[in-house]
Image (cartoon, rainbow, N blue to C red):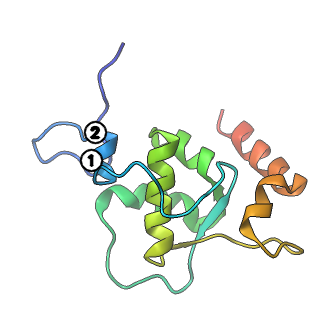
Amino acid sequence: MNGPTAAPGAGDGLGPLRPYLLVRGRSQPSRDLDRAALVITTVNAPHTAPQPHYLPILELCRSSACSLAQIAGTIDQPLQVVKIMICDLIDDGYLAIPMPAGLRDPSEAGTDPRILEDVLNGLRNLR
C-alpha cells in the first residue's frame, strides 16, 4: 500500500498534508450536498485569493459544472473532505450550484435524470 500523497499546496518541507488538515479537522459540511450535485465558479467571485489547496477545485469548475464525485476523483481526495471544501467555497462565494430549468431546490438535482446522465457521462470521460 502506498503512503499518503502530497496534497495540493503542500511542499513547505513539512511532508504531505492529511485530508483532515485541509478542512481544519471538520468532519461535517455546512450544508447537505449530494455527490451528484454540480458546482461551477461564480461570475462575481471574491477578490481575495482562496487557500492554495482550493485552487484545483476552482480550476476544474471554471469552464463547466462538475459533480462532487468528479472533483473528488480528479483531485484524489475523499468525498467527505471534498464536500467540506466545496461548502467552504460556496459559503465564501467562489462556487455556486447552477439550477437547471424547472428545478426550484438544489436537493432535487440528485434525482433529475438529465443531471444524473450528465454526471455519468462526465465520469465516463475521466477514463
- Residue 59 is situated, as x and y percent measured from the top left of the image, at 49, 61
CA distance separating discs 2 and 1 = 5 Å
Where residue 85 is drawn, which disc sits there?
A: none
Q: Residue at x 66, y 64 (%)?
A: 64
Q: Tag 1: residue type? A: Leu
> Mark 2 sits on what residue?
18
Q: Tell me, yes or no, whether the two marked residues, 2 and 1, touch with CB atoms within 8 Å.
A: yes
Q: Residue at x 49, y 45 (%)?
A: 80
> 122 above or below 91?
above
Q: Residue at x 23, y 37 (%)?
A: 16
In the rendered view, does 39 fall on the left or right side of 12?
right
Q: Residue at x 32, y 48 (%)?
A: 8
Q: Tag 2: residue type? A: Arg
> 31 above or below 99?
above
Please tell me how crowded label 1 is: few (under 14), some (14-19), or many (20+) other residues with Cα within 10 Å. few
In the rendered view, does 42 fall on the left or right side of 84?
right
In the rendered view, does 55 fall on the left or right side of 63?
left
Tally of numbered discs: 2
Q: Quadrant of residue 19?
A: top left
In the rendered view, does 8 fall on the left or right side of 33?
left
- Residue 97 is situated, as x and y percent measured from the top left of the image, at 65, 69
Give the SS element for disc 1.
helix
Q: Residue furthest left?
A: 13
Give the SS element for disc 2.
loop
> Mark 1 sits on what residue?
21
- Residue 111 is situated, as x and y percent measured from the top left of the image, at 83, 53
- Residue 25 is situated, as x and y percent measured from the top left of the image, at 29, 49
Please tell me how crowded label 2 is: few (under 14), some (14-19), or many (20+) other residues with Cα within 10 Å. some
Q: Residue furthest top?
A: 1
